[in-house]
Amino acid sequence: MTTTRTAGTAGANLITQILMWALPVLLLGFYVIPLLGVVSWSVTQPVAGLGNYARIVEGGDISSVFLRTLRISLISTVATVLIGYCLSYYWVMGSRLRQTILEICIFIPFWISVLVRAFGWLVILRDNGLANGFLMATHLISEPLGTGRNEFAVIVGMVHFMVPFSVFPMATVMRKIDRRILLAAHGLGASPAVVFAKIFLPLSLPGVFAAFVMVLVFSVGFFVTPAILGGGRVVMVAEAVFVQMFQTTNWGLGAAMSVVLLALIGAVVAVAYRLLGVRSFVD
Amino acid sequence: MFGRSKFGGALAYLAAAFLLLPLIAVIPVSFTPKRFLSMPDGDWSLRHYSALFEDGVWLSSIGTSISIALAASVLATVLATMFGLGLWFRRPRGGALLVGFALLPMVVPPVTSAIILYFLLAKLRLLDTMLGLVIGHAIMTLPFAVVAMLSAFARLDRSLEMAARNLGASTLQTIFLVVLPNLKAGMLSAWFLTFILSWEESTVTLFTSGIEVVTLPKRIWDNLRLDVDPVVASISVVMVVITAAVIIARALARHRYATQS
């Protein structure tokens, strides 16, 4: 009895070990080791040394690509979180009808390809597109505004892509807020605006914070939308990496830029983790 | 009384309109009779829809995308299910660490992942092949399958395992006869999510393929970067209409259910 049971558990042990380790081992071989290969490219191509990293920090064109990426990412992250907050609030707190309408409007773009969405903005924003056509037809402007293939178009496209993603963490936190607290404050005479500013907003901040970090991480590495709406004029890091890899075939510099990007995002996540950890500790 | 403000509600609807605007804007453009991107002025034409079905390159790209998405999503779902099973049975102390490791491709910026997979596929001589893209897409979608499966496992009743064991089931029997049948819904949602993500995956695809193997996103990309053919508009409209139909039907069903109860 005892022997068969140990034999059985040994077999079971092996099966569950294999199940648990299959994915991590594959990921190690097919992802982490190649990552080390990319790091090695960055210090050996085209010549051995840290030349590629020096080019990133020394203040030339590559540095300005990084600075532009950070600026655009910060602007679009703030805009995304503001728009997403407004949507989340009414998706969670609004009347049943409002909830249903907003849910439809949040989920349709969420499931649609990033390329189709960028294309939609291209149709609207390009120099002879719908926006300029509409404004000229209504005589609000006489010359087309330069809305196509510039930073404005890139930011609009990025914000549009990320708003649905930002809604989910914020809505999750808002759903957990106890409505009775809001009712109590209201019963004690606080106006809806005061209830929102003094109670709802502070309680929803963890969701805002999570959304902010997620969207920032997303936008720093964004490739498709900036490449299409920036039209090669507003080059962000991801597109610059693509150019280095396939047009100037400077694999080393492309690899170094993607490693720096990874480090930047790692830093953002680490700081966020620190702050979140401390906050949950205080709570 | 909360969430009833007229002004705030108007702002939310404005934001919602912003989300739908570019999806609606592609509709009129798709009916243009001209060969270039333009609004139909009076004349409406379906030529860009018929081109979609007559032009072999679009159909073959759709086929390529579906084949890759099928293979990659099944692979990712199977791996994620195995991983979930292992964690569920073993409950290791460093489980959170392992999960974090499995989520790596989701946190790493896509362009860095694209270079990593370019390096891998170059070494394996699989650049610009179907198999290479299946591997790449499976790795990129794995974390999402893991998240979906872990939340399915979290809802699974632990006493199932005990009951199966007490009745004398072996580990394999427990897995195939008891646990997996109870995870069908979770596996289906993991598979569906990874299928869609692979279907629209662009970054890794653009880095690791494009001449021999041309997926739909790659074909749309080429079109948007070089000269924009209004066929892109008609295919966009088809995708928007299908997505919108599914989502609206689902939301209305839920709305009706919620207002009845």
Image (tube, coloured by chain):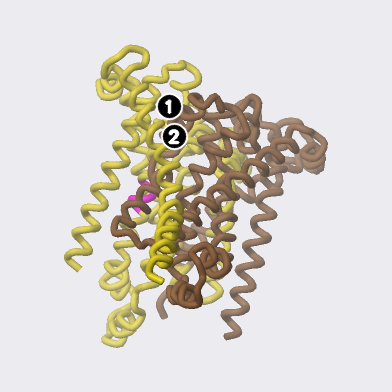
Chain colours: A yellow, B brown
Is A276 left or right of B32, judged from the image as shown? left
- Toward which corner of the image does residue A141 lie, by quadrant? top right
The residue tagged 1 is A241
The residue tagged 2 is B111
Magenta stretch in the rendered image: A212-216
Dot 2, how many residues are within 10 Å of its Cα: few (below 14), some (14-19), or many (20+)?
A: many
Amino acid of disc 2? Val
Same chain for the residues under marks 2 and 1 in the image? no
B21 and A262: which is toward the camera: A262
Q: Is residue B33 above or below residue A253?
A: below
Query: How much space separates mark 2 and mark 1, taking CA atoms?
Result: 8 Å
Q: Is residue A116 above or below residue B224?
A: below
Q: Residue at x 66, y 67 (%)?
A: B249
Magenta-span inclusion, residue B39: no
Q: Is residue A277 above or below residue B127?
A: below
- Toward which corner of the image does residue B40 lie, by quadrant? top right
Q: Residue at x 69, y 54 (%)?
A: B241
Amino acid of disc 1? Val
Magenta-span inclusion, residue A215: yes
- Return the residue found at the far top: A47
B151 and A2: which is toward the camera: A2
Q: Is residue B5 visible?
A: no
Quarter occupied by the N terminus of chain A: bottom left
Classify mark 2: helix, strand or loop.
helix
Proximity of marks 2 and 1: CB atoms separated by less than 8 Å = yes
Is B55 left or right of B146, judged from the image as shown? right
